[in-house]
């Protein structure tokens, strides 16, 4: 696997199949750790409901879990812009338009949540 100067993923051959490494790959371990923490928060919510916790306490934890997911999404979006979109800009052509449109739609989805 190789990366371009912009740090974006470049395809490589692996047993005859093309593989791609995305911009978040260099922080994959950190991302997985963060997602496991969020998963624990969700399990905590299930436990709170199972144990008949006070509604406001549950809502407080829902808010914390939501913010954690939003923060993760923004980090991933930043990495996408820095790597995938930047790589498309370096390559030029219509690929940059497609990547910008893709990122814009992702931002729109994040804003609707």
Image (cartoon, rainbow, N blue to C red):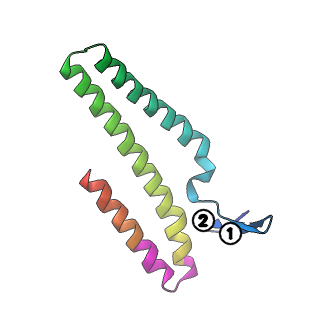
- Give the spatial CA distance, label 2 vs label 1: 10 Å
Choose between 47 and 92: the one closer to the eye.
Answer: 47
Question: Which secondary structure, mark 1?
Answer: loop
Side of 71 where 76 appears, left or right: right
Side of 81 where 109 appears, left or right: left
The N terminus, quarter of image:
bottom right
Pointer 1: what residue?
11
| Quarter of the figure with residue 90 | bottom right
Judged from this view, the residue extending furthest toward the bottom is 93
Choose between 97 and 109: the one closer to the eye.
Answer: 109
Question: Which secondary structure, mark 2?
Answer: loop
Q: Which residues are magenta?
A: 90-100
Which residue sits at x=34%, y=25%?
45
Does the segment drawn in magenta span residue 93?
yes
Side of 81 where 24 appears, left or right: right
The percent position of residue 88, horizontal first and vertical second, equals 53, 75
Which residue sits at x=43%, y=79%?
97
Which residue sits at x=47%, y=63%?
81
Which residue sits at x=40%, y=66%?
103
The percent position of residue 42, horizontal first and vertical second, equals 39, 29
Choose between 78 and 13: the one closer to the eye.
Answer: 13
How many numbered badges does the structure rendering display? Answer: 2
The percent position of residue 10, horizontal first and vertical second, equals 66, 68
Pointer 2: what residue?
8
In the figure, 43 relative to 30: above or below? Answer: above
Q: Which mark is residue 102?
A: none
The 10 Å Cα crowd at callout 1, few under 14, some 14 to 19, many 20 or more, is some
Does the segment drawn in magenta span residue 108?
no
In the figure, 113 relative to 57: above or below? Answer: below
Judged from this view, the residue extending furthest toward the front is 50
């Amino acid at each position: 696997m190789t990366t371009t100067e912009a740090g974006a993923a470049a395809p490589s051959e692996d047993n005859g199949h093309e593989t791609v490494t995305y911009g978040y790959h260099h922080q994959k371990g950190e991302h997985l750790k963060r997602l496991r923490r969020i998963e624990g928060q969700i399990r905590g919510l299930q436990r709170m409901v199972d144990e008949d916790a006070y509604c406001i306490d549950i809502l407080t934890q829902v808010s914390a879990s939501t913010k954690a997911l939003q923060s993760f999404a923004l980090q991933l979006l930043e990495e996408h812009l820095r790597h995938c979109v930047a790589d498309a800009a370096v390559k030029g052509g219509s690929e940059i338009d497609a990547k910008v449109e893709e990122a814009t739609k992702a931002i729109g989805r994040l804003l609707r949540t």
